C-alpha cells in the first residue's frame, strides 16, 4: 500500500494536460459489448477503474489491449454473462454492463454493487428502466438476474429522489439501442459523459437523438459496427487542477479541456475573484491576493458537480469569511470534513450543509482518504498547508486521477509516493 507525502507551500506554475474522462470511458468500454466488430478507443486514462473494467470484460470473453492511452477491443465471442461480486464490488460503474449484455445476448447476471462511503446509491432506477424494455429481472443472492426474449422500445422515466441517474441513463440507453422500436427516456441525465456515450453509439450506427437533454429518443437497430473513437477530457480532473492553482496562489494553463463542461465551476470560481481566461482548448487560471467566500449547492448537470464539492471545500477552508456548501446529490458526502479539520480547517456539518469559516493557513498532518474525491481534496489541502502532509489509502486516488503526483511535480509541487511500512 502506498501513501503520498506533500511538502506544502509551493506555488504551482506552468501547464498541465488533462487526461480522458473516467466517467465517460467506463460506459463506453461496456458499450463495446454491443458489437462483434473491433473498436479502437483513444484518450483513455491509465486508471485502476479502467483496468478493473477491462478485467471484467475479459472475464466475459472480450479481447482487449491497453497501451499508451489506446484500448483496442473486440467482443466477437461473449463466453459468459456473469459479472462477479469480487470485481463489481470494487467499482460501481461496472454495473453498467447490465444494459449492453441484455442488448447483445439478452441475458445478464450482474452483482449488486454494494455499499458506498459517500452514501446509499440504489439501483432501482436501472431495474425499473430495464423492465420497461421487456426485461424480466429477479434479485437473488446479491445478484441481478436479467433476461429477455426480445427487447422492446418503450417510454422510460428515470427521475429519482436526488435527480436523474447517470449510470441508469447509460444502462437503459445501451439496452434501448438494440430494442425493437422507439424508446423515449424522460428525466435522463444530461451530463457530458452521457452525450459522449451517445456519440460513441451513434458512430457505431445507433440512432440516438436528444442526448445531453432530459429527453432522449432511441430508435433501435439490429446491429452496430466497430469504430475508432476519442474520449472527451475529464472535467473533474480539470476542475481539480483549477483549484490547485488557486489554493497555492499559482498560475496554471490547463490544456485539453472543454469550457462548456466546466461552466458551473468557472462561474463559482469567478465569484471568488479568481482570474480565469478561456483559450481555444485550454484555460488560464491565476490566483489573486484575496479570494472571496462563496456558497455552493451541488446539483445534477449543468449545476455544480458533486464530484467537485470536496475539492472546492479545501479551497474555501483558506478563504477569509464564511462559506456554505450544500450537498443535494449525496447528503452523506462529507467524510473529508474531519480530515480537513485535522489540518486546521474550521468546518462544521449541519445536515446536508457544511459551514466553512476560512482560516489563514492549514497545517500539514497525517490524514486518511475515504473516497476518490475526498482524496483529491486532501492533496489540494496538503499543497497549500505549512509543513508535511501524509495521505494514506491513496488507492482511492488512483481510481480517478492519471499520474496526479507526476503532473503536480511538473508544476512545481513537492509531492512523492512512498510505500507504507
Image: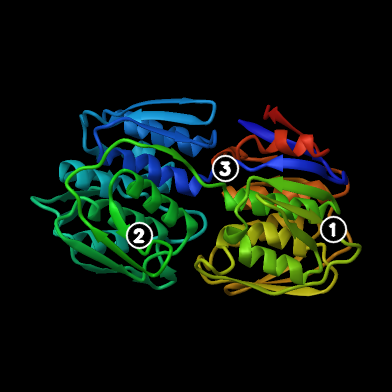
Label 1 or label 2, whichever comes before in sequence order: 2
Q: Dividing the image into 4 quarters, which one contains the C terminus? A: top right
Residue found at x 75% / y 72%:
271
Residue 130 at x, y = what percent? 22, 59
Residue found at x 87% / y 46%:
11
Which residue occupies the foreground of this view, 226 or 194? 226
For mark 1, does the 10 Å Cα neighbourhood hold few (<14), some (14 to 19), or many (20 or more) residues? many
Position of 336 with respect to 10 (left or right) is: left
For mark 2, does the 10 Å Cα neighbourhood hold few (<14), some (14 to 19), or many (20 or more) residues? many
Residue 419 appears in the picture as rendered? yes
Disc 1 to disc 2, how far (Cα)? 38 Å
Find residue 197 and name its label: none
Q: SS for tag 2?
A: helix
Residue 395 at x, y = what percent? 58, 38
Q: How is the image coloured?
A: rainbow
Residue found at x 28% / y 46%:
205
Disc 3 to disc 2, how far (Cα)? 25 Å
Label 3 or label 1, whichever comes before in sequence order: 1
Position of 330 with respect to 375 (left or right) is: left
| 3 vs 1, front mark | 1
Which residue occupies the foreground of this view, 216 or 55? 216
Find residue 169 and name its label: 2
Disc 3 to disc 1, how far (Cα)? 28 Å
For mark 3, does the 10 Å Cα neighbourhood hold few (<14), some (14 to 19), or many (20 or more) residues? some
Q: SS for tag 3?
A: helix
Find residue 396 and name its label: 3
Circle 1 residue: 287
Position of 186 with respect to 5 (left or right) is: left
Residue found at x 53% / y 36%:
47
| Number of marks | 3
Residue 390 appears in the picture as rendered? no
Amino acid at each position: 500500500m502506498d501513501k503520498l507525502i506533500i511538502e506544502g507551500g509551493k506555488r504551482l506554475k506552468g501547464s498541465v494536460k488533462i487526461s480522458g474522462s473516467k466517467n465517460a470511458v467506463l460506459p463506453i468500454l461496456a458499450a463495446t459489448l454491443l458489437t462483434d466488430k473491433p473498436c479502437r478507443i483513444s484518450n483513455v486514462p491509465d486508471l485502476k477503474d479502467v483496468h478493473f473494467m477491462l478485467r471484467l470484460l475479459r472475464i466475459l470473453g472480450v479481447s482487449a489491449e491497453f497501451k499508451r492511452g489506446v484500448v483496442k477491443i473486440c467482443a466477437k465471442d461473449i463466453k459468459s454473462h456473469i459479472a462477479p461480486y469480487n470485481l463489481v464490488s470494487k467499482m460501481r460503474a461496472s454495473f453498467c454492463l447490465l444494459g449492453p449484455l441484455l442488448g447483445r445476448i439478452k441475458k445478464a447476471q450482474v452483482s449488486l454493487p454494494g455499499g458506498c462511503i459517500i452514501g446509499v446509491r440504489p439501483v432501482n432506477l436501472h431495474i425499473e428502466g430495464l423492465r420497461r424494455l421487456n426485461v424480466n429481472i429477479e434479485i437473488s443472492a446479491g445478484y441481478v438476474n436479467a433476461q429477455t426474449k426480445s427487447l422492446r422500445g418503450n417510454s422510460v422515466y428515470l427521475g429519482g429522489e436526488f435527480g436523474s441517474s447517470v449510470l441508469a441513463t447509460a444502462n437503459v440507453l445501451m439496452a434501448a439501442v438494440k430494442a425493437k422500436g422507439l424508446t423515449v427516456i424522460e428525466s435522463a441525465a444530461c451530463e457530458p459523459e452521457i452525450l459522449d456515450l451517445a456519440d460513441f453509439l451513434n458512430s457505431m450506427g445507433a440512432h440516438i437523438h436528444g442526448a445531453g437533454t432530459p429527453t432522449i429518443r432511441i430508435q433501435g437497430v439490429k446491429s452496430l459496427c466497430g469504430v475508432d473513437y476519442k474520449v472527451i477530457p475529464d472535467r473533474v480532473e480539470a476542475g481539480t487542477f483549477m483549484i490547485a492553482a488557486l489554493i497555492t496562489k499559482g498560475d496554471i494553463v490547463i490544456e485539453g479541456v472543454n469550457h462548456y463542461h466546466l461552466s458551473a465551476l468557472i462561474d463559482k470560481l469567478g465569484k471568488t475573484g479568481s482570474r480565469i481566461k478561456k483559450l481555444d482548448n485550454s484555460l488560464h487560471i491565476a490566483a489573486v491576493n484575496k479570494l472571496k467566500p462563496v456558497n455552493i449547492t451541488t446539483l445534477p448537470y449543468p449545476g455544480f458537480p458533486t464530484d467537485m464539492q470536496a475539492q472546492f471545500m479545501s479551497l474555501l477552508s483558506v478563504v477569509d469569511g464564511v462559506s456554505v456548501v450544500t450537498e443535494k446529490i449525496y447528503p452523506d458526502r462529507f467524510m473529508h470534513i474531519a480530515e480537513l479539520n485535522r489540518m486546521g480547517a474550521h468546518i462544521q456539518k449541519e445536515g446536508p450543509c457544511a459551514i466553512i469559516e476560512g482560516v489563514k493557513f492549514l497545517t500539514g498532518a497525517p490524514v486518511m482518504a475515504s473516497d476518490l474525491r475526498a482524496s483529491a481534496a486532501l492533496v489540494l489541502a496538503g499543497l497549500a498547508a505549512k509543513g508535511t502532509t501524509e495521505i494514506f489509502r491513496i488507492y482511492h486516488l488512483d481510481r480517478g486521477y492519471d499520474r496526479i503526483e507526476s503532473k503536480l511535480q511538473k508544476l512545481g509541487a513537492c509531492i512523492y509516493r512512498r510505500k507504507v511500512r
